[in-house]
Amino acid sequence: MDTQTEIETRKLKLPSQALKSIFQFSENNSSTLVKSEQLDAKTLHAFRVEQIGLLLPEAIISELLEDMSTCRLPNTSPVLYGMGNLRGKVIPIFDLHYLFDMPRGDGRYFLVIGSDENTVAVLLNTLPLQVRLSEREKLNSLPPIPDSLRPFTKACYENDGLWLECDLFDFFLKLKEQLN
């Protein structure tokens, strides 16, 4: 027969209480530091053109397509890959590899960016991804980047490569104007 003391010690405990008796958690500043860094970080959608990563604004609408009906335009810059049919709407498709003077790979994805009259597509070799960036990773000055991006770049981050926060609407608007 169990004594009253034995029964009380076998009572169920909350998981945090049970673990606290096994592991000695210290209340140091390093756990607080990690939490504040995590709060500071933001997760953004992004895509790469070779070694240059471009961040998509949080409020922008984007869509990834593996196939799109396209039409090449004769006597145009190779930066304009062609025009695409997006659910009955004709949109420009840009190949930023040519603009940035980089070799184009074999993969072919179409990243549709924007909506309404501001919709464009970008030809990509790799799938877009999510990037988690913090203010701590923000660079104080711009590293060497393509001249065509420089006027539109708001911020630059270093985290497993170079990530540029650009005004993509103005960037693509300027590209459209240059190709007309």
Image (cartoon, rainbow, N blue to C red):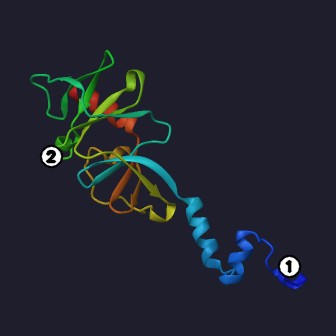
Question: In this rendering, would 17 be left or right of 45?
Answer: right
Q: For residue 31, which numbered disc appears in the image?
A: none
Expressed as whole percent of the image width and height from the top left, the position of residue 45 reads: 42, 46
| Element at label 1 | helix
Indicate the quadrant containing the C terminus: top left, top right, bottom left or bottom right.
top left
Q: Residues within 10 Å of mark 1 (few under 14, many from 20)?
A: few
Asked whether 13 or 56 is in front, the reply is: 13
The answer to whether the residues at label 2 and label 1 have Cβ atoms under 8 Å apart is no
Asked whether 163 or 178 is in front, the reply is: 163
Distance from Cα at disc 2 to Cα at disc 1? 68 Å
Asked whether 12 or 55 is in front, the reply is: 12
Residue type, numbered disc 2: Gly
Please name which of the two marks, 2 or 1, marks the residue nearer to the observer.
1
Indicate the quadrant containing the N terminus: top left, top right, bottom left or bottom right.
bottom right
Which residue is identified by label 2?
105
Residue at far right of view:
4
Asked whether 28 or 9 is in front, the reply is: 9
Which residue is identified by label 1?
8
Which residue: 57% across, 70% down? 34
Residue type, numbered disc 1: Glu
Which residue: 70% across, 79% down? 20
Which residue: 16% across, 49% down? 102
Q: How crowded is mark 2: few (under 14 residues within 10 Å), some or many (20 or more)?
A: few
Question: In this rendering, would 135 be left or right of 65?
Answer: right
Which residue: 36% across, 26% down? 119
